[in-house]
Amino acid sequence: MYDFYLNKTLINDSVIEVTYSENIEDVGTFFEFTSNVDFGITSEINGKKTINCFELCPCGTRNPVYVGYITDCEHTNNINVYKYSGFDVGFYLRNNQVVKKFNGENIGKAIITLCQENNIGEFKNNGLNSVFSVSIPNFSQTIKKIYKGETFDEILKELLKLEKSKGGLKDVYIDCKNGRLNILQYQNEESLIVPVAQALSLDGLNSFNNATVKHSVQKLRNNVVVTDNASDKIVKYEQKQEDDSVATYGLLTHVEKVDTNKSNNLVKVAENKLAELNKVKETINLSIIGDYRAGKGKIIPVNLEEYNLIDNFLILSAKHKIYDNREEIELSLKRYNEKTT
């Protein structure tokens, strides 16, 4: 199913188990693997000390679907087993703080500038000289703001949120698993044909199991008040309420603070926030047999009538466990409606 590489060297015979976890709200993903070999955190390559780079490639290819950097190693209580963990390129986005002023630049250009100034567009893994690039869509909105000490990943998430709130790109997410910074649109995945034995394969979308569906109103809000974000003012500018929801669940108020010196449509802000919050939260979890294609940002069809799950669903998070030529994936899903996302 996969080949495992450390610093470009095949290590299949020394890997016991691999897991990695991804979430649509996060920039980076976490991975870990166990081995019977002591690799450490760093190696010397071409006379230079470099952080160890772990790659996961479909068998027989050198096209990595996961590229991670080891940040921690542990000699476990089993004297013959070592555990390694780390993150993909998102580690560098999460651990670099930024001082930058934008004066109305296009969001896409702002992201490229941040990448250039933080060595993201041409990150070189020391002796390996492994360069990864940046892949982003065309943004329509602009940014005017000063950042002092915010981390690169938090700025990226804020820029995507701003783009969507101003009527630009929606249904985009950040993914760094393949060794580069990618800002991608949600994608349909209609089939997950994977090998399960010699000359035998199955469609992972027919292997759903361990399903749970939970509903909660703990975070539901049916009354939204929009007010100025200035600390020396208490002014109510706009309020929107859903009377039927209040009659059912009781009054639940959310206060949204905005900069009213800017050209914000306060009525629209209140309406959009009310539509976002006035919902019963549905949490859907299930497991499948699959591969790397069953990851965050993918839209998959689910047909589990006994759980009322007959729809298209967006993968919010996925935990992949790879062992004995088998990949089990725990998924968290959300019903996907293109018109309302």
Image (cartoon, grey):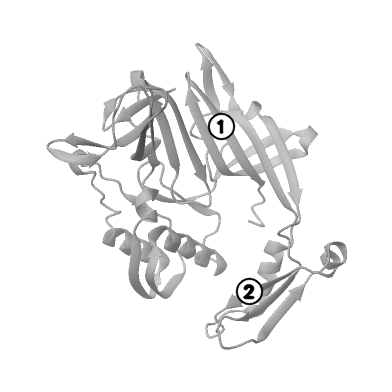
| Quadrant holding the C terminus | bottom right
User: Is residue 58 visible to the viewer in this orientation of the structure?
Assistant: no
Looking at the image, tell me whether mark 2 or mark 1 is earlier in sequence order: 2
Residue 240, position as x, y percentages in the image: 74, 75
Per the image, the residue denoted by label 2 is 256
Whether residue 289 is situated above or below residue 52 in the rendered picture? above
Q: Quadrant of residue 275?
A: bottom right
Circle 1 crowding by C-alpha within 10 Å: few under 14, some 14–19, many from 20: many
Q: Tell me if label 2 and label 1 are in contact, CB under 8 Å.
A: no
Look at 48% across and 18% down and name the residue there.
324
Q: What amino acid type is highlighted by mark number 2?
A: Glu
Whether residue 338 is situated above or below residue 54 in the rendered picture? below
Residue 131, position as x, y percentages in the image: 26, 45
* 236 left or right, relative to 62: right
Q: What amino acid type is highlighted by mark number 1?
A: Ile
* 18 left or right, relative to 267: left
The residue closer to the viewer here, 88 or 121, is 88
Whether residue 299 is situated above or below residue 38 in the rendered picture? below
Look at 73% across and 61% down and name the residue there.
220
| Quadrant holding the N terminus | top left
Per the image, the residue denoted by label 1 is 329
